[in-house]
Each structure stands twice: as structure tokens, then as C-alpha cells.
Image (tube, rainbow, N blue to C red):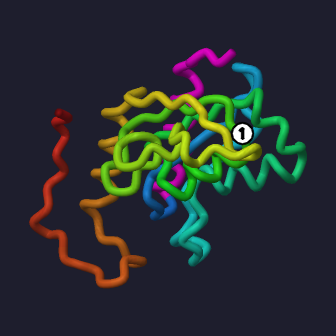
Amino acid sequence: MSIYNEEHMKAALRVAQEAYDNLEVPVGCVFVKDNQTIIAQGRNRPNETFNATRHAEIEAIDDILKEHDVSVFQDTDLYVTVEPCVMCASALRQIGIRHVYYGCGNDKFGGNGSVFHIHNDARLETPTSKPYPSEGGFFREEAIILLRKFYVRENDHAPIPKKKATRVLKTEIN
């Protein structure tokens, strides 16, 4: 049984800050086994690795699978600062994650309800791809502010860098 723990979401936010500090989109996550032990953490690394698939969740999943059998995920919850994208939501189904807790929604690529319902779409169920519960809104404001801080600064890895001199950091969250 999964039980939300705000300390784990705070840990995910610290990892997201690491991503921000490394000029990555600030998404961070932790995987927590049996509601208590963080067995891996991950942060976005696409800019650093020049590989668009190196999202926080994938980074952490790869680390876990180096030391554990995939069955570990049935007793493991994910805490992530931003709703998993379609790719990550699908990966989470395939590994059999127990529960996902996220900060803010992902209104462009969300796979856990904001755009698509990869996490619980019955049409996607197979013997190796089962639905999982997902809840959002945990430390939502903090996650949004980190994203906004990232997007108001110049991104040297963007395909066509745009001047952002007129952009202002909005600190009010609706």
C-alpha cells in the first residue's frame, strides 16, 4: 500500500534544483521502496547527454535496474516534480510502478491525465503493462516556479535561441 510522504517530494525538488543548476529543464524524481527507502533519484539530462530520452524517470529506472530485478517496482512509488510525459508514463506502466505522485501537470506532453491517460488507459493493458494510480498537485507551486525560472533564462541548447530580455519571472501561481 502506498502512502504519500512530503519529505520524498521535497527530495525530488532538490534533485530538480540540481537539474536547473546544470542548465537542464528542472525535473527531478526519487523512487521510494516500501514507503521509506529512496532506491534511486534522477534528474533531466537531455542537454548534458545530447539525448532527448534522458528524462529524470528514465535516468533513475536505469540505475535501479543495475542492482534490482524489475519486480522491485511493484513495491516502489515515484515522486516527480512534473507529471510524467507520454514516454515516461509508458515506461512506468511497463515496469509496473506501484504509484506516482507528481508536483505540477504537464499541459503539453503529460501522460498521467493532463493530455493523455497513459497511466490508466484500459486499452493499453497487457500482461506486462498494467495501469497505476497517479496523483498530482504536491508542491505544485515550487515545481512551477523552478520551470519558470528555467524558461526565462537563455538556453544555449535550444534549437534556435531566442532573446528573452523582455520576459519577466511570474511568481503568482493560479
Residue 173 visible in the displayed image: yes
Q: Is residue 23 above or below residue 84?
A: below
On the picture, is 142 further left or further right than 52? left
Residue 132's quadrant in the figure?
top right
On the picture, is 82 further left or further right than 107? right
Residue at 76% x, 55% y: name it: 62
Q: Is residue 162 above or below residue 37?
A: below
Dot 1 amino acid type = Gly
Residue sitting farthest toward the left: 166
In the image shown, does 108 or 90 lie closer to the viewer? Answer: 90
Residue at 36% x, 83% y: name it: 159
In the image shown, does 147 or 68 lie closer to the viewer? Answer: 68
In the image shown, does 118 or 139 lie closer to the viewer? Answer: 118
Per the rendered image, the range of residues in magenta is 1-21
In the image shown, does 1 or 53 lie closer to the viewer? Answer: 1
Residue 14 visible in the displayed image: no
Where's the N terminus, which quadrant?
top right
Residue 3 magenta-highlighted: yes
On the picture, is 16 further left or further right than 174? right
Residue at 47% x, 53% y: name it: 85
Q: Is residue 41 above or below residue 36?
A: below
Q: Position of residue 27 (x, y in %)?
A: 48, 50
* Image mark count: 1
Q: Position of residue 22 (x, y in %)?
A: 51, 61
Q: Position of residue 91 (x, y in %)?
A: 64, 52
Residue 52 magenta-highlighted: no
Q: Position of residue 56 (x, y in %)?
A: 58, 53
Query: The residue tagged with tag 1: helix, strand or loop?
Result: loop
Residue 125's quadrant in the figure?
top right
On the picture, is 32 further left or further right than 11? right
Majority secondary structure of the magenta segment?
helix
Q: Which residue is mark 1?
A: 96
